[in-house]
Image (tube, rainbow, N blue to C red):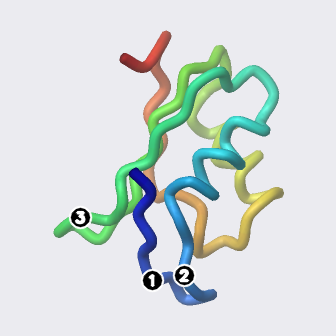
């Protein structure tokens, strides 16, 4: 399911962010949770890279307001 949420640069969709994360080399799976009560956007990825490397790559590909606040790295997503 694709969620759209407001961001300072316009509406962003979870599908757009997931697709962009999958464009990062070595990211094989990605999932985004729209901002909840804490207001933070969370991204889970399956990759050999660190969370910092993934977020850095996303900053190169997306407007800053669309980059997740937190990134969690796992071996694989269920």
> Callout 1: helix, strand or loop?
strand
Circles 2 and 3 in contact, beta carbons < 8 Å: no
Q: Residue furthest left?
A: 37
- Furthest toward the top, the residue is 75
Residue found 62% across the figure and 19% down from its top: 47
Disc 1 residue crowd, few under 14, some 14–19, many 20+, Cα 10 Å: few
54, above or below 42, in the image: above
Residue matched to label 2 = 11
Residue 69's place in the image compared with 19, above or below, is below
The foreground one among 9 and 2 is 2
The residue depicted at 56 percent of the width and 34 percent of the height is 51
Please state if 41 lies on the left or on the right of 19 as rendered: left
Per the model, the C-alpha gap separating discs 1 and 2 is: 5 Å
Distance from the alpha carbon under mark 1 to that under mark 3:
12 Å
Residue 61 x/y as whole percent: 80, 58
Task: Identify whether 7 is placed above or below 28.
Answer: below
Are the residues tagged 1 and 2 within 8 Å (C-beta)? yes
Name the residue located 81 percent from the left edge and 27 percent from the top edge.
25
Q: Position of residue 62 (x, y in %)?
A: 74, 64
Circle 2 Cα neighbour tier, 10 Å, few/some/many (<14 / 14–19 / ≥20): few
CA separation in Å, label 2 and label 3 = 16 Å
Ranked by sequence position, the earlier of labels 1 and 2 is 1
Q: Residue at x 50, y 82 (%)?
A: 7
Label whose residue precedes the other's in the sequence (1 or 3): 1
Name the residue carrying label 3. Answer: 36
Q: Earlier in the sequence, mark 2 or mark 3?
A: 2
**Which residue is tagged 1?**
6
- The image position of residue 41, as x and y in percent, is 40, 59
């Amino acid at each position: 399911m694709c969620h759209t949420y407001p961001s300072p640069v316009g509406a962003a969709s979870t599908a757009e962010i997931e697709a962009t994360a999958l464009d990062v080399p070595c990211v094989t799976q990605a999932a985004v949770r729209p901002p909840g009560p804490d207001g933070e956007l969370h991204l889970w990825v399956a990759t050999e890279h660190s969370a910092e490397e993934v977020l850095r790559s996303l900053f190169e590909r997306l407007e800053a307001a669309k980059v997740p606040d937190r990134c969690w790295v796992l071996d694989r997503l269920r």
